[in-house]
Amino acid sequence: MNSKRNDRIATGVIYFLVGLVILLLIGIIGNILLSGVPHLSWDFLTKASSSFEAGGGIRDQLFNSLYLLVLTLLISLPIALGAAIYLAEYAADTWLTRLIRTTIEILSSLPSIVVGLFGYLVFVVQFGLGFSIIAGALALTFFNLPILTSNIEQAINGVPQAQREAGWALGLSNWKTIRGIVLPAALPGIITGVILSAGRVFGEAAALIYTAGQSGSTIDYANWNIFSPTSFLNVMRPAETLAVHIWKVNTEGIVPDVNVVSAATSALLIIVVIIFNFGARALGNWLYKRLTAAKAK
Amino acid sequence: MSKNKQDLQEVVEQAIAEQKVPHVKFKKTAPQNVDVAKLTKASKETRQERWGKGLTFLAIILIGILIIAIIGFVGMHGLATFTSDKVNIGHFLFSSEWNPSAGSSHVGAGAMIVTSFAVTLLAALIATPFAIAVALFMTEFELGKRSSLLQSVMELLVGIPSVVYGFLGLTVVVPAIRTIFGGTGFGILAATLILFVMVLPTITSLTVDAFKAVPKELRKSSAALGATRWQTIYHVVLRAARSRILTAIIFGMARAFGEALAVQMVIGNAVLMPANLVSPSATLTSQLTSQMGNTVMGTLPNNALWSLALLLLAMSLFFNFLVRLIGKRS
């Protein structure tokens, strides 16, 4: 009965390890939420941050994060969509496409600090953009593009071949089939992928420290002139995001209430990530039902 | 194309010559009105098709250019330390005297390389048994609601920004180490513990995929031979999934090696050869993060930092290569 005993011991060990992991997960998420949520107030969200006094808020960082996210998606989505369509629909299995796939894999595994430093070298220094939102958005595009592309490719590959054949049978060209049939059918998957990648971009800091910068400029939310240096829409102004803010107040900051600010900001980031994570899935399922009149897989 | 056009022209001419009943009503389609050029021109659909294909291919090319640009630029600046500042490569890799502002004989990244590898290997070492246990739990033990709940929480862990982990390390892990082991609390141990949590979901999800790829028949045959669940897992499932588990661990290591901010916040940032697990040290990424802003472009201290970045890039490429090699062999 040696094997029976071993089986029981192994099962016990596995359950023990899994139990530890679950405790760890609860501990981490619980710790962040419990220490941060009590400090999350409307006041905190809508007040400008302070550089040396206690009681600063995160209004500008919050706006910068969202603005940067929108810009990044505006730049990366069309490219990722094109690349994914090519890979899923046109690419034959040749050395060239294999090389391209390898390239995308390498790009997705590059350390984000390397991407950030490259962005600093090329966009900030070479192109003369300076520490600016647009430089940050371009660096984040690098970071985002491979993830987005493979997500969209998966969504497109998930569309049944019969739907394409139906399109061709109607005499549609390949391109029209893709635009009119495949893309709408893949839309729920694509949107899920976009939101998931948006969650990652939202929390990214390493790629932004040397591109979008670590300091905010004075922002005037009533100034709609995008060329004015104080306008909130100006893409040439330096911008600190939420994640960079946490890093900065902890490593270089001198505000006395460092822990309160970082705990509350961390909690906010986690909440946003949770919303993105579950929102993406819920929205995807809902769209899938709406568009295909079928039950979600 | 032109050959086709000539053929078509001939056919049309022949039709006109053989024509017996003259067209009256259908002027437009009458043979003498046939516009060969128009007939042989690409249809609207074909043109759209070409446009679409070209446009999507352009996106692909762009991604290709990006990766070449990254390697090119980082390589150019990283190699400047060796070409224009005449730093000895061996010295750079193995010496641990890091003080680039004092001259080219003081550029040694040894301490950072050792620390980077130490935190990466230790984190992977701790995370692997946990990851395998969780993956076994999700694929072999609990297949229902509980395992999918665990999976979505794991996915949530991937989404937690690295600075949040760094902050957690700063407020929870570092003080804990300080009270238990003494010292400052900053060092390899703190970084390892943070990285362990960060790579755990990566290794777990890939290991789950590895177990799912093991055919059901193998498990059934093993059970039919009278093997217990653990015997099946140990002798069949783990063995069949071995190379993919290895790939998962390497992916986790790649993530740990490239992680910058969380490590920078808890490692202590003193470029010293680590004396023990709780003495302050620095990794390649932490040094890059904290010092890049303090150097002037084109000077030796700046070039030396770019060399660190190049080393980081090379390691990332090496991890990729390793994954490919293992994938090819199995």
Image: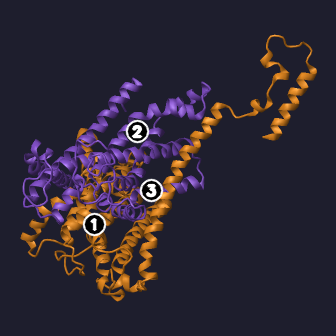
Q: Mark 3 points at which residue?
A: A105
For the residues tagged 1 and 2, is the chain the same? no
Q: What residue type is labelled 1?
A: Leu
Q: How much space separates mark 1 and mark 3, taking CA atoms?
A: 24 Å
The residue wearing badge 2 is A190
Q: Residue B125 carries which label?
A: 1
Q: Nearer the viewer, residue B58 or A36?
A: B58
The residue mark sitting in front, 1 or 3, is 3
Chain to which mark 3 belongs: A
Q: Nearer the viewer, mark 1 or mark 2?
A: 2
Give the chain letter for orange.
B
> Is disc 3 on the same chain as disc 2?
yes
Placement of the N terminus of chain A among the 4 image quadrants: bottom left
| Residue depicted at x 30% and y 87% | B102
- Tell me which corner region of the image, top left, top right, bottom left or bottom right, holds residue A169: top right
Q: The residue tagged with tag 1: helix, strand or loop? A: helix
The answer for which chain carries disc 2 is: A
Q: Is residue B321 left or right of residue B226?
A: right
Q: In the depicted view, which residue is nearer to us: B240 or A63?
A: A63
Quadrant placement of the C terminus of chain A: top left
Residue B220 position, x and y percent, is 38, 45
Q: How many marks?
A: 3
Location of residue A199 with respect to A185 vertically, above or below: below
Which chain can be seen in purple?
Answer: A
Residue type at mark 3: give it: Glu
